[in-house]
Amino acid sequence: MRRETVKGEHESMSFEFTKMHGAGNDYVYVDCFNTHLDDPASVAVQISDRHFGIGSDGLVLVMPPETADADVRMRIFNADGSEAEMCGNAIRCVAKFAHRRGMAVVNPVRIQTGDGVKMVEKVIDKSGEVTSVVVAMGEPRLEPESIPVNISTGDASGMVIGMPIEGNLEMDLSGEWVAKAGLEKNFSCVSMGNPHLVFFCDSVEEIPLAGVGPGLENDPAFPRKTNVHFVEVLSGEKLKIRTWERGSGITQACGTGASAACVAASLAGKAGRNVLVQLPGGDLSIEWRSENNVVYMSGGAVEVFSGRWGD
């Protein structure tokens, strides 16, 4: 008798995996030095399902680099199967994953991403364990075409910082929650190798994220969609963020988003260049250095469990 395959099951695919998280932003990691996945986008959808799969924000492949100036390569697939250029939390986990398995024990390690090669410094204790990771995230991109966003700034700065909502975003940010949240009627856009839309408000807890996130992510102003962040400024050195991630929905943390929020807050005069960012899954330290214009992100990487997927 032929058994029907139900959602989340496989008939032939089998591979070892490790689940890891950075500040609660969890992905399934696969050693693609020794494993080949024919259709990683489809795999990402199946394993990310939190009822029928492993449960994650997506899939990360840890692979041999394609370029001589890198030690290891990562490919990131969101929970919906779309491929992302870069993920700040995932790259920290890749550094730890590759270190533990002997793929890349050099320090710093050069990791090839969809946004180029990133320098990643591992903090290693006396036992040889990676306890935290510092990532040179690169320079923020602020020109509309680099983000990308189809919005004319209309001023000499050329930046999409503090732009009025009216007449720009088609998504209607209205309702009783707007006043409760103290939502500011403007927005900023920053790219950290992937697009980010940033709003400031008085209380991130009052944001109906599941309701407004999808429309903003898919707004026609963003040709490659966008990540969406609501930021509460606690002080000049501390921000609180809630995030709707492109392709994954509500997540516990977003490293590139925390970096983008620091840049947007600094340019808007709301915070300094060195901030602690509080996310639902934990804290990240972000520093936007004036001497080289590079954003640095510091945080942990946690290995949760390993197993085998499939037959």
Image (tube, rainbow, N blue to C red):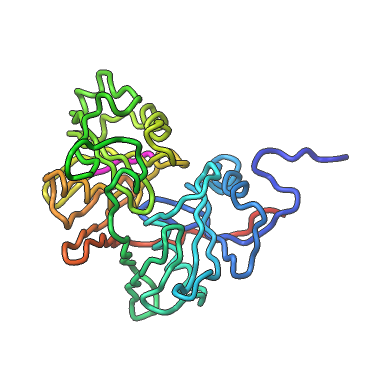
**In the rendered structure, does residue 270 fall within the stretch colored magenta?**
no
Relative to 79, say whether 218 is above or below: above
Give coordinates of residue 105: x percent, y percent.
44, 78
Q: Residue at x 35, y 25 (%)?
A: 171
Q: What kind of secondary structure does the magenta stretch mostly adopt? A: strand
130 or 225: which is nearer to us? 225
Image position of 199 (left or right of 50): left
Q: Residue furthest top?
A: 175
Q: Magenta residues, as a range?
A: 240-244
Residue 185 image position (x, y, % from top left): 20, 28
Q: Quadrant of residue 170?
A: top left
Q: Dividing the image into 4 quarters, which one contains the C terminus?
A: bottom right
Q: Residue at image x 75%, y 53%?
A: 12
Quarter of the image where the N terminus is located = top right
- Vertical comparison of 115 with 46: above or below: below
Q: Is residue 90 above or below residue 249?
A: below
Q: Quadrant of residue 119?
A: bottom left
- What's the residue at 18%, 54% (across, down)? 275
Residue 276: image x %, image y %?
20, 54
